[in-house]
Image (spheres, rainbow, N blue to C red):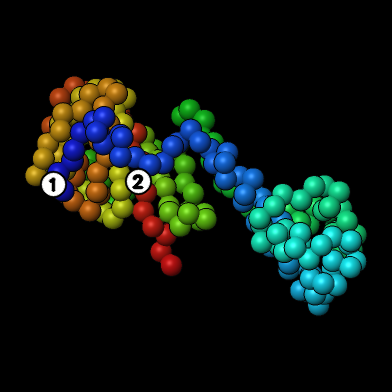
């Protein structure tokens, strides 16, 4: 697969805004989570929507909107529902409070390790690992250091997508039948199933961040 440079024409085609932070979606996600919890508690107690409407004084239409995540109920409404269903108010938020992992690795504390196919004197420091998350994707960031004694040859080949960001030094990096000169600040993003690796060590020491992502095995 030939790697294309990320120009303005490609950027204009990207539809995901990384700065949105789901600000438009977070409220909707919370509404849906609350609605699911309300419905679950109601069904657990074998209470119909009509019964709950009578218990709370809320209309059937309003309860339907709440359970389907189509409206944002006030705290007063949630308290009324909690009292009627005999559950804590906070129980309505359990579906929203999903575990989100973060890994903080201090400078110099990355775990030095060898990856399968690693050439001689290629120092790999694993900076973090999240192996189970809602996205179904495993992400492994590495800090790779190459010295004067480092072996070359592109022997790496594995599943997933890899991104390389050069921090220091210069290398000619092969991906498939293409070779890319990489210097500080350069990025290479590629399909890791093709043979790849540093083919020529131009200026050493060389350090770069490698982020590998691949689907979780089910």
Q: Seen in the image, is 107 located left or right of residue 27?
A: left
Depth check: 54 or 86 in front? 54
Q: Is residue 115 visible?
A: yes
**Residue appearing at x 90%, y 66% in the figure:** 55
Q: Which mark is residue 176?
A: 1
Tag 2 secondary structure: strand
**Residue appearing at x 15%, y 25% in the figure:** 202
Q: Where 46 sits versus 133, above or below?
A: below
**Residue appearing at x 31%, y 35% in the figure:** 12
Disc 1 versus disc 2: distance between alpha carbons? Answer: 17 Å
**Residue appearing at x 48%, y 33% in the figure:** 19
Q: Is residue 117 visible?
A: no
- Check disc 2 and report the residue beneath it: 212
Image quarter of residue 9: top left
Q: Is mark 1 in CB contact (under 8 Å) with mark 2? A: no
Image quarter of residue 35: bottom right
* Residue 147, x across and y down, in percent: 24, 28
Q: Earlier in the sequence, mark 1 or mark 2?
A: 1
Near mark 2 (Cα within 10 A), the count class, few <14, some 14-19 or many ≥20, is many
Q: Seen in the image, is 102 located left or right of residue 50?
A: left
Q: Where 150 sits versus 26, above or below?
A: above
Q: Which mark is residue 186?
A: none
Farthest residue to the bottom: give it. Answer: 46
* Residue 114, x across and y down, in percent: 33, 46
Q: Seen in the image, is 101 located left or right of residue 157?
A: right
Q: Where 117 sits versus 14, above or below?
A: below
């Amino acid at each position: 697969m030939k790697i294309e440079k990320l120009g303005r024409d490609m950027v204009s085609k990207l539809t995901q805004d990384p700065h949105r932070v789901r600000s438009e979606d977070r409220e909707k996600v919370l509404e849906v989570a609350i609605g699911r919890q309300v419905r679950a508690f109601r069904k657990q107690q074998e209470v119909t929507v009509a019964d709950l409407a009578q218990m709370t004084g809320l209309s059937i239409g309003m309860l339907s909107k709440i359970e389907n995540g189509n409206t944002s109920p006030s705290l007063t409404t949630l308290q009324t529902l909690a009292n009627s269903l005999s559950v804590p108010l906070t129980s309505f938020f359990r579906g929203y409070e999903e575990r989100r992992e973060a890994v903080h690795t201090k400078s110099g504390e990355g775990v030095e390790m060898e990856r399968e196919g690693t050439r001689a004197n290629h120092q790999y420091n694993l900076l973090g690992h999240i192996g189970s998350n809602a996205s179904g994707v495993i992400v492994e960031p590495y800090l790779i250091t190459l010295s004067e004694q480092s072996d070359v040859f592109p022997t790496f080949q594995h599943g997933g997508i890899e991104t390389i960001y050069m921090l220091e030094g210069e290398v000619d990096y092969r991906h498939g039948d293409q070779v890319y000169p990489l210097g500080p600040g350069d990025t290479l993003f590629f399909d890791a199933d093709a043979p790849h690796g540093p083919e020529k060590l131009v200026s050493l020491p060389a350090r770069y961040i490698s982020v590998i992502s691949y689907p979780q095995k089910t």
